[in-house]
Amino acid sequence: MRPAATLLLLATTLGLVAAAAEPAATRLGNVDYVNLDEAAAYLGLRVEHLGTQAVLLKDGPQPVARLAEHSREIDVKGLRLFLGSVVLEHRGVYYVSETDYRVRLVPRLRPERVRPMREPPKVIVIDPGHGGVDHGTENRTLGVMEKTCTLDVALKLKRLLEASGYKVVLTRESDVDVPLAARALIANRAGADLFVSIHFNSLYPNTKTTGAEVFSFSPRAQRSTDSWSLGGKDDAEASLAPVNAFDSWNTILAGAVHRRILDALRDGDRGEKIAHFGALRELRCPGILVESAIITSDKEGALLKTPEFRDKIAAAVFQGIEDYCAMMGGRDPKVQAAPAAAAAAPSAPLARSAPTRPSGP
């Protein structure tokens, strides 16, 4: 450990360090950045360098995040998360974009500091993706259709939530087509406190990759995660969407659901990402879009045909919602949400599948 870091840790332990000021933004290129050392101090954390190209954020002796130079991908408490801008390093000092610091790092590392505080959700809207003439993606070899699986998982999740005392509204309860913009409108008219859109991924013709992704709406002036892929176009938006008022809470919700899905399925972590999804744009409450499995995968496509696997997905999303509510002090998260979630997770580390996602929901 560097001498300065040693002195800082000792002084903090003895209660001699005054509360650090919130970091000021510095313009680097066309993006506002904050000094990671200053950000860490404000959050009661410290920076530990790993060689010359990566750093750890540590809470006492416990690592809580790993960041690498010129990368948007970071590790937060074992979960894969994609920032909107790359991490920069200059003369041994690391910088993260001011937006990523404010709406990604603070909510995940110090959620108690997010303001304004929200009341625990009472009304939850579940959005089964696709429907009617919009089949979503399909695995024709296995005879699995996305619109059918999303509705089944949503109905199972509705039962779990209602049994736990929530009021639940579905954007569709049968095989009908609901326009993307109408899904958010349904949530707003219902007075939703929370919105979760259920989808399944496609990587066709790749039939081997498995894994889960969780999306929130891109913050203002930030590109969608997948727009950084080879050939992608800058899709950053200069204006705020209604759902951007909840950027920090979207991050907290995404992290809670992401954790529970990975713990339950353990089939590969494709990360928490951001995108300009129409189902989320007009929301007036926190919301996320969940892709818990890849329907075109031989393995996960076959699993999705079984009620037991769909039970497991619904139970994991339910438990993530409960965890999110518990962070607001409103509920005690249940150890097990349903019999489908009862199987103990293996101790092996989670796999990380390829991050590309070529088609939208």
Image (spheres, rainbow, N blue to C red):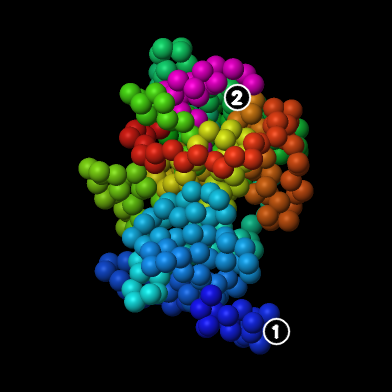
Check disc 2: other Cα within 10 Å, few if <14, some if 14-19, many if 20+: many
Q: Position of residue 138 (x, y in %)?
A: 41, 19
Q: Which residue is mark 1?
A: 14
What kind of element bears circle 1? Answer: loop
Q: Which residue is mark 2?
A: 310
Question: Residue 315 appears in which quarter of the rendering?
Answer: top right
Instruction: Find out whether residue 308 is within the magenta segment.
Output: yes
Residue at screen point 48% across, 34% down = 211
Nearer the observer, 186 or 44: 44
Q: Which residues are magenta?
A: 290-309
Nearer the observer, 173 or 227: 227
Residue at screen point 51% across, 71% down = 47
Nearer the observer, 67 or 147: 67
What amino acid type should be assigned to the residue bearing mark 1? Leu
Relative placement, left or right, of 351 versus 193 is: left
Q: Position of residue 350 (x, y in %)?
A: 54, 41
Q: Position of residue 285 (x, y in %)?
A: 55, 49
Q: CA distance from mark 2 to mark 1?
A: 51 Å
Q: How many marks?
A: 2
